[in-house]
Amino acid sequence: MAAPTEHRTPDRPDAPSDADRSAPAPEEAGAVANPFEDLPHPHLELEPDGPHLSDFYAYAELLTDPELEHLRRLRSYLASDVAPVVDEAWASDSFPDQLIDGFAGLDLAGLPYGLSGWSDEPARRVFMGFVHAEIARVDASTNSFFGVHSGLAMGSIDACGTPEQRERWLPPMARMETIGAFGLTEPHGGSDVAGGMETTARCEGEEWVIDGHKRWIGNGTFADVIIIWARDVSEGEDGRAVRGFVVPRETEGLTTAKIEGKTSLRITQNADITLSGVRVPDENRLSGGKGTFADAGAVLRRTRGNASWACTGVQMASYELALSYALEREQFGRPIAGFQMVQDALVQMLGNTTASLGMAVRNAALIDAGGGSDAHSALAKQFCADRMRETVALGRQVVGGNGIIVGNGIARYFADAEALYSYEGTREMNTLIVGKAVTGHSAFVR
Ligand SMILES: Cc1cc2nc3c(=O)[nH]c(=O)nc-3n(C[C@H](O)[C@H](O)[C@H](O)COP(=O)(O)OP(=O)(O)OC[C@H]3O[C@@H](n4cnc5c(N)ncnc54)[C@H](O)[C@@H]3O)c2cc1C
């Protein structure tokens, strides 16, 4: 684990300059090998300034000038360093390691916790939402890497740690010298991980001994620290308490294995994790929360809202790619954009995207104002994910056969949408959360 040092400021000398980040030509950004050079290529505008075509109601105008400046720097970096590498990384199922330094240079990870060179105040959720949408608009896996680290891992320490634990772990994570992962899901415990958690932690003097398995853990193959959630089976406990532990990856007994063969979010490195007699000191137990599953729930309450923004970003890209293609592709002697049924698809995509953005914005604003409940974030995730699934399918439809080629833009979003649909609570789990809130009756079976 890297030792804490001073905050890296946004104007540090080794940070990429705006000049370094000039947007590449569209044919450089994810170009597809195409023997027919006159064929149109779906185009995602990577110019850092100005509104996106998909922000039809101009929601970005809700941001302040300093927030817009952050976003401009992020867009510039995404254009120069992320867009050009993601199709190849997706095809080869690999994570471009340079993204860690790149995101560190942007100084975004600590923003929600007031840990950045920009401000000591926690960033607004509305602004962080735009950050997630912006990253997902270029690549959903890259947003997953950033979200797991900044949202789930840092968020666990922030929500469930003591002030001393926050002071110890968060600053190096904010600088991205220490990368985090979040280990909740298990091979036999997905939707029902609260009731069915099999990983155990047993207190032995000043230490805890952790045994079990975790599955699907994003960043799990390379993270420096992994938040492991485990059922407390210490003497005198009835096994109902669930505790979070900060487990450094080099701890003896912890092994990780990359999950191979994914068809979605292929750049995200998900791992199966085995914990076999893993020992951590009591100071690594997140002891500022309730010591129940509600602690993990408190983290997910925050990050589910972020997931709704990611689903929105994917829709923004899909709509923009499909629109650009429809304007260029000609059939029956005219651009396909001029056909009523193609316009119907495009307008449905725009409506889905606009409704998702509106819901994500309002949910974030409620949280910023000190309100917002589990049900609000669950409904936002459920709705935006549902709309996303339709939007990416319509986008693929508009691009026709060319829409199934990775490198032609739309195919990657189409495939990545499936993982977004299931993580941070499946549609059914989020529906049950909202259903319970609005009816007063729980349809969960335990
Ligand atoms: C790419 C990716 C990244 C992930 N990253 C992480 C991570 O970083 N950390 C982490 O801890 N987890 C992570 N996850 C795990 C993710 O949160 C789970 O996949 C999710 O919670 C669903 O669990 P499951 O896949 O085991 O599906 P299951 O729980 O087995 O569900 C299968 C199906 O049954 C449905 N179902 C289950 N119970 C009910 C019910 N009572 N009523 C109606 N329908 C029901 C579900 O909705 C789903 O459609 C990730 C998953 C993916 C795919």
Image (cartoon, rainbow, N blue to C red):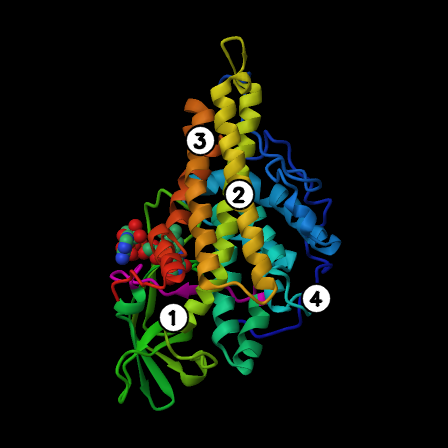
Residue 161 in picture, x, y percent from top left:
49, 77
The image's mark for residue 394 is 3
Residue for point 42% across, 48% down: 420
Magenta-span inclusion, residue 20: no
Identify residue type, mark 3: Leu
Q: Is residue 299 left or right of residue 16?
A: left
Residue 164 in picture, x, y percent from top left:
55, 82
Which residue is labeled 1 in the image?
228
> Closest to the observer: 133 or 55?
55
Q: Residue 189 appears in which quarter of the rendering?
A: bottom left
> Closest to the observer: 443 or 83?
443
Which residue is labeled 4 in the image?
119
Q: Residue 187 appears in which quarter of the rendering?
A: bottom left
Image: 228 above or below 434? below
Q: Residues within 10 Å of mark 3 (few under 14, many from 20)?
A: many
Q: Residues within 10 Å of mark 2 (few under 14, many from 20)?
A: some
Asked if ligand 1 lies within 8 A of label 4, the reply is no
Asked if ligand 1 lies within 8 A of label 3, the reply is no
The image's mark for residue 355 is 2
First of labels 4, 3 by sequence position = 4
CA–CA distance in space, label 4 to label 3:
41 Å
- What segment carries the magenta color? 174-192
Residue for point 54% across, 71% down: 2
CA–CA distance in space, label 1 to label 2:
36 Å
- Dominant SS of magenta comes to loop
